[in-house]
Amino acid sequence: MAVETEASAAADLALSDANINWDRLDKTRFHVIGAILLTAQSGLLHPTAVVKTRMQVAGGGLLHLPGFCVFKTILRNDGIPGVFRGFGTSAIGSLPGRVLALTSLEVSKDMMLKSTEGFNISEATRLAMVNGVAGMLSSIVSSAYYVPLDVICQRLMVQGLPGMTTYNGPFDVIEKMLKTEGLRGLYRGFGITVVTQSPASALWWGAYAAAQHVIWRSLGYGDDAKEKPSLLELVTVQASAGTVAGACSSIITTPIDTIKTRLQVMDNYDVGRPSVMKITKLLFKEDGWRGFYRGFGPRLLNMSLWGTSMIVTYELIKRLSVKHMAE
């Protein structure tokens, strides 16, 4: 009888299972499963990040090539290791950051849900606001950890291009940057990351929550609906909402991402210490407004695929981490 009940519950899920809150999660299981699955997911998408970074950085004759041509060029010159350059550092280094990001996201979301219970606003607006604020706070907290890691990984991605320093692994990057610029060098782009990525994260999570809510209602599902969505419908709706959120975010944030990437890898001190204003002027001089959307194709693909796969993976992690009734 218990087996039949579990099978029935899996095939006939309530909409509440799409919003599993922090109190219902086994925290240890949540972080362990999350670290494993999110690392695997980022590994699958890492080549698009390498292509995007190469397209945004001057040198190597890749500035005006389509993303697929850049991918083939990297494969031809460096083989498979070339499109996964920097992944080892990113995968291992991201583990503590994932714990920090996941915890801050879920705790913030739980606090916001409780504090907005009495608000006289639509449910779609409330969910968008709750997820948006949680995404922004999570981004601010995790940026302190992820920005130095991002700088190191991007340095490894672009080494080999004309004018770029060559490194013997991540620790060599840290040593050389600390020697030439101090700790400040590892935090290049921190200000622009916090100022831009926090609203971008708010936009992503807010758009995801609102899109999911709208899709459910358009399909005829509501909190009082007699018919419950199947597991396949649940995953499909969450994936679709993630795709919408990823596409919206990539369109708005690509110019800032291009400036940030240049800022983090630039070593040309002939023009003085790199700054946001100097790089903005340089990009505009090189290619006009089009220059700010270098790597847009791979970034759109990366963000859309990332949004879809990340949210499906993330929601799976939460379902696998729900506390058992006995707990």
Image: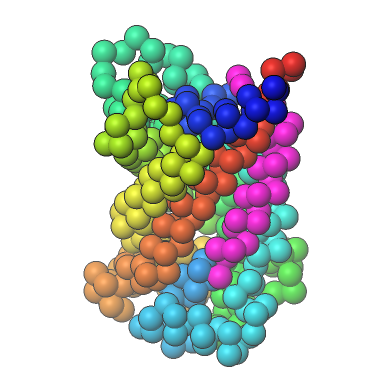
Residue at 38% in and 12% down: 117
Residue 96 placed where, x, y %?
A: 70, 43
Residue 148 placed where, x, y %?
A: 61, 54
Quadrant of residue 238 in the image?
top left
Figure check: 62 above or below 224: below
Nearest the camera: 20 or 112?
20
Left/right of residue 44 with respect to residue 167 in the rendered view: left
Figure check: 152 above or below 27: below
Figure check: 145 above or below 184: above
Majority secondary structure in the magenta region: helix
Residue 34 placed where, x, y %?
A: 66, 42
Asked if residue 76 shows in the view, the reply is yes
Asked if residue 277 shows in the view, the reply is no
Nearest the camera: 151 or 88?
88
Residue at 62% in and 62% down: 43
Residue 171 placed where, x, y %?
A: 75, 63
Marks counted in the figure total: 0
Residue at 74% in and 17% down: 327
Is 152 inside the magenta-drawn segment?
no
Left/right of residue 30 with respect to residue 190 in the rendered view: right
Residue at 41% in and 57% down: 304
Identify the magenta region.
23-47
